[in-house]
């Protein structure tokens, strides 16, 4: 077997063993401590992720809007609840989280 074939086979096997995107993103939400205020199905301090997904359903700029709110925080979007800014979350991680949240319809 050629060296290229071995590398491709290894990459395919590694990809098959990696976590699913949804699980990986849920783990990211836990790692970034988002779950202190949000859960998938239940309101905690902030809205559930499914409620967020429903609110943004059909909005063309939803992913970018939500990623911006994840990093920059928001006020008055969900009543009196205020989401603090999270500048330590990278733009890439915010985009990953936004995409995952929006997939939870």
Image (cartoon, rainbow, N blue to C red):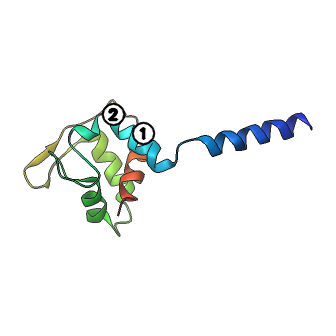
- The answer to whether residue 89 is left or right of residue 18 is left
User: Quadrant of the rendered structure where residue 29 is?
Assistant: top left
Q: Residue furthest right?
A: 1
Answer with mark 2 or mark 1, whichever residue precedes in sequence: 2
- CA neighbours of label 2 inside 10 A, class few (<14), some (14 to 19), many (20+): some
Residue located 64% across and 45% down the image = 16
Q: Pointers 2 and 1 in contact (CB under 8 A)? A: yes
The image's mark for residue 32 is: 2
- Say which of marks 2 and 1 sits in front: 2
Q: In the rendered view, does 56 fall on the left or right side of 80?
A: right
Lateral position of residue 19 relative to residue 94, left or right: right
Tell me the quarter of the picture where residue 77 sits: bottom left
Residue drawn where x is 29% and y is 58% of the image: 50
Which quadrant, please, contains the N terminus?
top right
- Give the residue at x 42% y 39%: 93
In whole angstroms, how far apart are the C-alphas of marks 2 and 1?
9 Å
| Residue occupying the far front of the picture | 17
Establish if 90 lies above or below 42: above
Which of the 4 image quadrants contains residue 83? top left
Instruction: Give left or right: position of 58 versus 12.
Output: left
Q: Which mark is residue 58?
A: none
Task: Give the residue at x 30% y 39%.
Answer: 71
Mark drawn on residue 93: 1
For the C terminus, give its image quadrant. bottom left
């Amino acid at each position: 077997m050629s060296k290229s074939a071995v590398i491709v086979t290894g990459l395919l096997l590694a990809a098959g063993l990696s976590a699913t995107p949804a699980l990986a993103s849920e783990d990211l939400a836990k790692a970034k401590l988002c779950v202190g205020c949000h859960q998938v199905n239940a309101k905690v301090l902030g809205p559930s992720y499914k409620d967020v997904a429903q609110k943004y359903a059909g909005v063309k700029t939803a992913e970018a809007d939500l990623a911006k709110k994840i990093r920059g925080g928001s006020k008055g979007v969900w009543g009196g609840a205020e989401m603090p800014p999270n500048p330590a979350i990278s733009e890439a991680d915010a985009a990953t989280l936004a995409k995952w949240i929006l997939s939870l319809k």
